[in-house]
Image (spheres, rainbow, N blue to C red):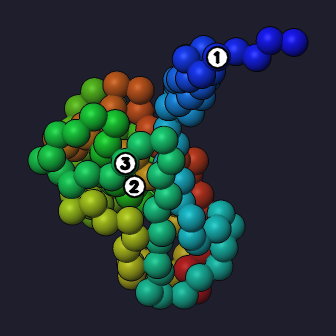
Amino acid sequence: MKLPNLKTQLIGLSLASTLLCSTVLAAEPSVYIIAPADGASVSNPVTVKFGLSGMGVAPAGVERDNTGHHHLLIDVKEMPDLTQPIAADQNHIHFGGGQTETTLELAPGEHTLQLLLGDYLHRPHSSPVMSDKITITVK
């Protein structure tokens, strides 16, 4: 049995690593709420931790491929226009500094939380990256 020479082995390894990297990079990005858990009963102050996979975090105003920053939607019944910059108000909280968690004071009762990733200009990406909406109860 003849073994492949070193050059052939290196070419094979290079092709295999290219295919592996392409597969990993092709994964769809996702954003999610790490804590609190969906359905949780919590007390103030409420700490919300953000998760992101398949992309990186960059502050607003910093244009880098495959990055964005978090926007927390609180008690938003309908998604904003995903072709426009995300509003900044009490229900659409911007984390343009690249923050990955926040602490909130919420009125007692039921609240919904959802993350929406924005680009350097606070616009949703062309394929919007948003979390599932979770519901929490503040005691």
Question: Crowding at label 3, few (<14), some or many (≥20) Cα neighbours within 10 Å?
Answer: some
Across and down, in percent, residue 136 comes to 59, 69
Q: Quadrant of residue 78?
A: top left
Find the distance from the CA under tag 3 to the CA under tag 1: 40 Å
| Residue at horizontal 44 percent and vertical 38 percent from the top | 129
* Whether label 3 touches label 1, CB < 8 Å: no
**Where in the figure is residue 41, as x and y percent of width and height?**
65, 79
Depth check, mark 3 against mark 1: the one in front is 1
Left or right relative to 91: residue 115: right
* Labelled pair 2, 3 in contact (Cβ < 8 Å): no
The residue identified by callout 3 is 56
Q: Amino acid at mark 3?
A: Gly
Give the mark, 1 or 2, whose residue is nearer the N terminus: 1
Secondary structure category for the residue under label 3:
strand
In the foreground, 54 or 122: 54
Amino acid type of the residue that numbered disc 1 sits on in the rendered structure: Asn
Relative placement, left or right, of 26 versus 80 is right
The residue positioned 41% from the left and 43% from the top of the image is 55
* Disc 2: which residue: 73
Residue 103 location (% of width, % of height): 39, 79
Which mark is on residue 25?
Answer: none
- Circles 1 and 2, Cβ within 8 Å, touching? The answer is no
Q: Is residue 110 at least partly visible in the picture?
A: no
Find disc 1 in the rendering and name its residue: 5
Disc 2 is placed on an element classified as strand
Q: Residue at x 18, y 51 (%)?
A: 60
Residue type at mark 2 is: Leu
